[in-house]
Amino acid sequence: LQQTKDACWPCSICMSKATAERYGVGHGEEVWINQGGDKLKLIVNIDSNVPDLCARVPSGLAGTECLGGQFTEMKIERA
């Protein structure tokens, strides 16, 4: 699994184009993710498979271990 495209570094946050526009960011730009008091900077990856108002951050990868649960609310801010 570590050899799949989802396991590549740098890790990214996947979201729809509409969601990215809501936060004022585009593909390749950076955002801060805050979840449970832990903060992480990730690169935005526009993904049409992710529903609007949702975001996907891969878990189990180096760099994302500081975040909370996979299905927990997170705060997204432009970096």
Image (spheres, rainbow, N blue to C red):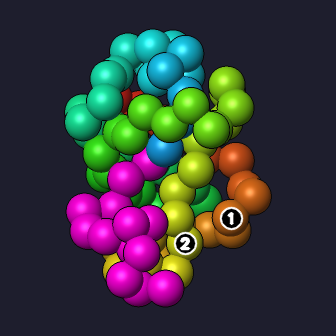
For marks 2 and 1, the one nearer the N-term is 2
| Most distant residue in the right direction | 71
- The crowd level at tag 1 (other Cα within 10 Å; few <14, some 14-19, many 20+) is few
Q: Magenta region: which residues?
A: 1-13
x and y percentages locating residue 7 in the rendered image: 40, 73
The amino acid pointed to by label 1 is: Gln
Side of 47 where 7 appears, left or right: left
Residue 9 on the magenta segment: yes
Is residue 23 visible in the rendered image? The answer is yes
Note whether 15 is above or below 10 in the view shown. Answer: above
- Say which element carries label 2: loop
Position of the C terminus by quadrant: top left
Residue 63 on the magenta segment: no
Q: Name the residue tied to disc 2.
A: 59
x and y percentages locating residue 37 in the rendered image: 52, 58
Note whether 62 is above or below 40 in the view shown. Answer: below
Which residue shows up at 34% across the image and 22% down it?
A: 25
Which residue shows up at 58% across the image and 50% down it?
A: 56
Tell me the distance, in whole angstroms, between the alpha carbons under discs 2 and 1. 7 Å
- Say which element carries label 1: loop
Q: Nearer the viewer, residue 73 or 17?
A: 17
Q: Nearer the viewer, residue 68 or 2?
A: 2
Q: Are marks 2 and 1 in contact (CB under 8 Å)?
A: yes
x and y percentages locating residue 11 in the rendered image: 34, 62
The amino acid pointed to by label 2 is: Ser
Q: Name the residue tied to disc 1.
A: 70
Decide whether the magenta segment is chiefly helix, strand or loop.
loop
x and y percentages locating residue 45 in the rendered image: 38, 40
- The crowd level at tag 2 (other Cα within 10 Å; few <14, some 14-19, many 20+) is some
